Structures are given as structure tokens and as C-alpha cells.
């Protein structure tokens, strides 16, 4: 979390300043109430000087933003608003690229999603003070990133490059063993690459995690992919272009 100009960080931002900046960036061009700024820093137990402290952090951020005349933190009766072009903000650029990918063909979608994912640098909201922002906004930001990873893998698969996505999907499944769509995509990638046995192993491992940790059996997306692998359907040699079955979209 920070402010960059031509790949150089501008100024030194403390965790407290990062919290204020994060609240403004997440709601760019919208007023962020002072109460939310205070909550982002101190949760439900603010200090007596909380409002004055927020004003001080905003003042320092304004100085850091000075090189960007088209970006400013303005004061409103309710709080503050960051007025800027959203294309300057990685999160909003990421979301725009993901939206564009939804209406693109598989090859172009894989390119757009790859570009979007390159905008991520570490966990969302790392370096901020307090737990309120990570516990509220952090969860849905991480879900956006993981969903984009799955969409990217699906696009690469649909473009006929199954082997190219195995490593990415393997890492995703290892880190998030309860994500059934990721496991389904990995099974499809392995199957299309001629690794039917490894695909079945992914199903068994994922089912074990689901049963042991959540007490549930795999859902339809994983069961359907399992049946395709068992019956050896949808297997295509590397390089062929075949639409994904509905179960793994």
C-alpha cells in the first residue's frame, strides 16, 4: 500500500497513513465519513484525539500527493474524498480489466486477466494499522483476486493451453484446498495434458478436505468433472481449442 510515481515510492507512509489512504482509495471519488476513518484506525475504541490524528494523517498524505495536480484529498462536511482518475488506482484498473475479459474471446481474456493479476503485490491491505479494514474489506478483495486467478486459468484452458496453467492451478489448490472450482479446473488441465491419474488424485484430496474440514461432499462442479475424467471424456491433446464444459466455467 502506497503512492508511486514512475515505479518510485513517494514519501514515507506509516501504517496509520496507509489506513487512511486505503479507505480513500477503496472509495475513490466518494466521501468517506470521518467515523469510518476513525474506525479504520482504532476499531470501536477510538482515542480522544482520534479526529485530530486523522486530520494530521490527511495533511501528510496531501503533501505526498502534491506531484499529482489531478489528484487531491478534499474536505467535505462529512469527511474526506479522494478526487482522482480511477485509472491511477491499481484496484480499479484491476476491476476494469476483469470486466473487459468477460466479453473477450479466450485468448484475449487470458491476456487481460494476466495483466490484471500483475497489479497485485502481496496480500490486500498489507501494511495498514488496525484490523478493521483487513477484516472487512480484505476478505472480499482477496476473493476478487482468487476469482480472477480461476478465470485466468479457465481462459488459458479454453484457449487450448492446458499445460500452461497446471503450475498456477496447483499452487492455488494447495493454498486453498476447499475451492472446488480451482480443483475442477486443475483436474481438467491435468486430464487434457494426459495426466488422468493425477486428475483423479486431485479429486480424492479435495473430497477429503471437504469432508474432514466442512463435513460436506463435493458439489456438482467437482462431481461432474470427476465423471468426465473417469469416463475419459473431454480429453484433448495439448494445443487443440475446445470450449470448456459448463461444469468448469
Image (cartoon, rainbow, N blue to C red):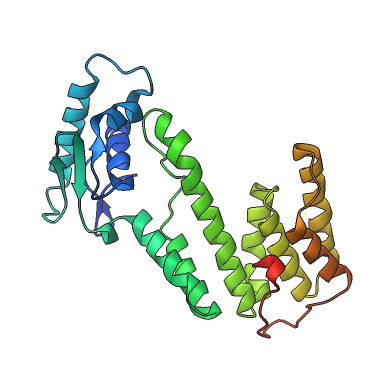
Residue at the limit of the structure toward the front, as seen here: 77
Q: Percent x, y for residue 176?
A: 65, 48
Instruction: Determine which quarter of the picture holds residue 162.
Output: bottom right
Q: Residue at x 13, y 52 (%)?
A: 67
| Quarter the N terminus occupies | top left
Q: Judge from the rendering whether residue 154 lies leftward or rightward of residue 228; answer left or right.
A: left
* Residue 98 in view, yes or no: yes
Q: Judge from the rendering whether residue 89 lies leftward or rightward of residue 234; answer left or right.
A: left
Q: Residue at x 43, y 29 (%)?
A: 131
Q: How many marks?
A: 0
Residue at the limit of the structure toward the top, as seen here: 48
| Quarter the C terminus occupies | bottom right
Q: Percent x, y for residue 5?
A: 23, 56
Does 40 sit above or below residue 116?
above
Q: Residue at x 38, y 20 (%)?
A: 44
* Residue 196 in view, yes or no: no
Q: Percent x, y for residue 92?
A: 35, 57
Identify which residue, 34 or 183, lies in the foreground.
34
Instruction: Determine which quarter of the picture holds residue 172.
Output: bottom right
Does 145 sit above or below residue 108?
above
Residue at the limit of the structure toward the bottom, as seen here: 240
Amino acid at each position: 500500500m502506497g503512492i508511486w510515481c514512475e515505479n518510485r515510492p513517494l514519501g514515507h507512509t506509516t501504517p496509520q497513513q496507509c489506513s487512511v489512504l486505503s479507505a480513500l482509495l477503496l472509495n475513490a471519488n466518494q466521501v468517506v465519513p470521518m467515523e469510518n476513518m476513525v474506525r479504520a484506525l482504532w476499531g470501536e475504541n477510538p482515542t480522544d484525539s482520534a479526529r485530530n490524528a486523522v486530520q494530521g494523517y490527511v495533511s501528510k498524505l496531501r503533501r505526498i500527493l502534491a506531484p499529482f495536480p489531478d489528484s487531491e484529498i478534499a474536505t467535505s462536511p462529512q469527511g474526506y474524498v479522494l478526487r482522482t482518475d480511477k485509472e491511477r488506482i491499481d484496484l480499479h484498473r484491476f476491476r476494469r480489466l476483469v470486466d473487459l475479459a468477460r466479453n473477450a474471446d479466450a485468448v484475449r481474456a487470458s491476456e487481460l486477466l494476466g495483466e490484471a493479476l500483475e497489479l497485485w503485490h502481496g496480500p490486500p491491505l498489507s501494511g495498514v494499522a488496525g484490523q478493521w479494514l483487513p477484516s472487512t474489506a480484505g476478505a472480499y478483495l482477496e476473493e476478487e483476486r482468487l476469482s480472477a486467478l480461476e478465470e485466468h486459468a479457465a481462459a488459458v484452458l479454453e484457449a487450448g493451453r492446458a499445460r500452461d496453467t497446471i503450475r498456477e492451478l496447483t499452487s492455488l489448490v494447495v493454498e486453498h484446498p476447499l475451492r472446488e472450482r480451482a480443483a475442477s479446473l486443475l483436474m481438467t488441465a491435468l486430464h487434457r495434458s494426459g495426466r488422468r491419474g493425477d486428475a483423479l488424485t486431485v479429486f480424492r484430496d479435495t473430497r477429503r478436505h471437504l469432508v474432514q474440514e466442512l463435513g460436506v461432499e463435493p458439489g456438482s462442479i467437482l462431481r461432474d468433472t470427476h465423471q468426465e475424467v473417469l469416463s475419459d471424456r473431454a480429453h484433448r491433446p495439448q494445443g487443440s481449442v475446445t470450449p470448456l464444459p459448463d461444469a468448469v466455467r
